Amino acid sequence: MYNLLKGKRGIITGALDENSIAWKIAERAQAEGATFTLTNAPVALRMGKINALAEACNTIVIPADATSVADIEKLYEESEAHLGGKIDFLLHSIGMSPNVRKGRNHGNLNYDWFQKSLDISAISFHKMMQVGEQKGIFNDEASIVGLSYIAAQRTFPDYGDMAEAKALLESIARSYGYRLGKAQKIRVNTVSQSPTPTTAGTGVSGFDAFLSYAEKTSPLGNASADECADFVISLFSDLTKKITMQNLYHDGGFSSVGISPEVVEAMQS
Ligand SMILES: NC(=O)c1ccc[n+]([C@@H]2O[C@H](COP(=O)([O-])OP(=O)(O)OC[C@H]3O[C@@H](n4cnc5c(N)ncnc54)[C@H](O)[C@@H]3O)[C@@H](O)[C@H]2O)c1
């Protein structure tokens, strides 16, 4: 390890179990010398294993529904008190669509659920930045990262209204990134990650096919959750101070490939 986050404080959302991308990021952040609080929705705290992670990372878990401004306010107040200061990094690793969960595609969306998908998976990113700015929780030169998926740019069957949520998430990163960049030299980026076997990932029907198609298409193969953690740590570090308002593909090259010999071969067999 390189002590890349030595002395930095942060907040990590979205660690549900050891498969979660946020779980790997928390482990890696700790190894790199950061201190941070963990948070997840109250219902996830009951179902998940986050307390074991908190113990391993010597920290606390603060319940917060990311769609609730009051919960986010409380999260920031309790984090600042626990960490002994403002924060240098924030991870948004939150996604959920009731329509995807219930198998409802673009021709059959429940619109109340659609709004829920957007609120949980994208608008919560805006809320975390707006509330954070209003409460003055961010140190100058802080780094904020949200996790995205290439369905924001291209159509994937069964990803449903999460595609719209990811497009909105990436747009929010640009809009709020400009604002926080001007005000405090804060970076805001999204990382567009390969399909990864987590609770959220495997909830998309046909996930195994997504995974193997992406593996066959990407010259470097799919990026794992551990590799995603490595990349996100670099974005939280001082080595990437001029990268902002970007959607950064962390996908083994998938996003730049048309078709690969492996996919051609699979089609012919
Ligand atoms: N797994 C993949 O294939 C993949 C690929 C690209 C991007 N992503 C994104 O990575 C992020 C993390 O997902 P993951 O794959 O680690 O799965 P995960 O299921 O482990 O994490 C999703 C998290 O969102 C949390 N969450 C849901 N509703 C919430 C709410 N109202 N308030 C607070 N937290 C809430 C869940 O409790 C869970 O911890 C998501 O944004 C997801 O869309 C995942």
Image: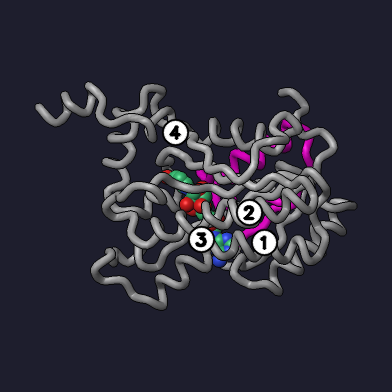
Cα distance between the residues tagged 1 and 2: 11 Å
Residue type pointed to by label 1: Met
Can you identify the residue that label 4 sits on? 251
Residue range of the region highlighted in magenta in the rendering: 11-40
4 or 1: tag closer to the N-terminus: 1
Q: Is residue 123 left or right of residue 207?
A: right
Can you identify the residue that label 2 sits on? 13
Residue type pointed to by label 4: Asp
Tag 3 secondary structure: helix
Q: Quadrant of the C terminus?
A: top left
Vertical side of 43 occupied by 156: above or below:
above
Residue contact at pointers 1 and 3, CB within 8 angstroms: no
4 or 2: tag closer to the N-terminus: 2
Residue type pointed to by label 3: Ser
Residue 73 in percent (x, y) is at 75, 68
Residue 21 in percent (x, y) is at 54, 43
Can you identify the residue that label 3 sits on? 121
Tag 1 secondary structure: helix
Cα distance between the residues tagged 2 and 3: 12 Å
